Amino acid sequence: MATHPALAEEVRPALALRFVLGVPTADIARLFLVPAATMAARLTRAKKRLAGSGIPFSIPDRNAWPDRLDDVARAIYLAFTAGYAPGGGHDVVRAQQAGEAVRLAGLATDLMPGRPVLEALVALLRFQHARRDARVSPEGALVRLADQDRSRWRGAEIAAGLDRLTALSPTDGLAEELRLQALIAAFHATATRAADTDWAGIVRAYTRLEALAGSPIVRLNRAVAVGEAAGAMAGLAILRAAADELPGHHRVALVRAELLHRGGQAEAARQAYLEAIDACPDGAERDHTRARLALVS
């Protein structure tokens, strides 16, 4: 209903997030890397376009569904991400919200079986959601992937994700982007210990994903993976390109701090942590960054 092709491509998933899934505008803006006021204006224009064009806000004929699947998949994935992306406030994760997105992904797949974009989405969400019990410490603090208690990961959900993933072949478009993200998540999900992670495989997947998506966030994540696979300095070289496209983003500073710390540059790492703290909204992620800063000797 919310992904009518008459609407601008960049606003369709946002409209679904706000008016179908109830994600707050500020959270949507963070997901799209734009100011909240910009996102609010986009949503307002979309509503006016719907009202002024006579487009019926109703469930389309089933024959129109295939053309809307990418937008539906994007909206569900972004709703899931909003549940696990710490924003303002001290809600570390919102697993119930993320779980609703998992349910919707499964429902969409039941309605349109055999569609690679939905199969890849379900696999990815299964892997990510399986870690929900280990994402937060007993004290309520954010726990890094490397530090999570893997015995608390839900093995049955990981196995279900693997079943979906192994049935998929390389393709193109959003389906391939989601398949590659699911592959990366599978590398993490199947490593018995953090030290056993196949970082070289993750780098290869991120390299293909970056070529396909051209996203600075993907490049940021690739910098982390390269830092693990080839050393901190190699990761920092890639990070510089991401920083140019994400000026002032707190996660760029945080990744820089982590790589510098690992590379033995304590003072530079300290300054980067402080930069990340200044740029980060108040809440769980800022608390986590302060805790990381305290470890720099």
Image (cartoon, grey):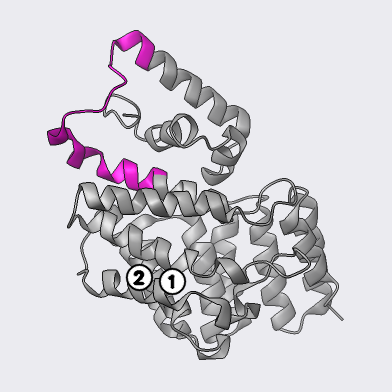
Give percent across and percent down for residue 40: 56, 26
Quadrant of the rendered image containing residue 122? bottom left
Which residue is found at the position 86% from the left and 73% from the top? 294
Secondary structure category for the residue under label 2: helix
Give the crowd class for mark 2: few <14, some 14-19, many >=20 residues within 10 Å: many
31 left or right, relative to 179: right
296 left or right, relative to 220: right
Identify the residue under disc 2.
Answer: 161
Instruction: Quadrant for the C terminus, please.
Output: bottom right
Which residue is found at the position 35% from the left and 9% from the top? 52
Instruction: Quadrant for the N terminus, please.
Output: top left
Which stretch is magenta? 50-75
Which residue is found at the position 20% from the left and 38% from the top? 65
186 left or right, relative to 30: left
Residue situated in front as seen by the camera: 153 or 3: 153
Secondary structure category for the residue under label 1: helix
Q: Contact, CB < 8 Å: mark 1 with mark 2?
A: yes
Residue 245 visible in this rendered orientation of the protein:
no
Give the crowd class for mark 1: few <14, some 14-19, many >=20 residues within 10 Å: many
Q: Which amino acid does label 1 sit on?
A: Ala
Labelled disc at residue 185: 1
Which residue is found at the position 56% from the left and 83% from the top? 151
Within the magenta stretch, is there residue 170?
Answer: no
Figure check: 39 above or below 91: above
Figure check: 105 above or below 252: above
Residue 5 visible in this rendered orientation of the protein:
yes
26 left or right, relative to 60: right
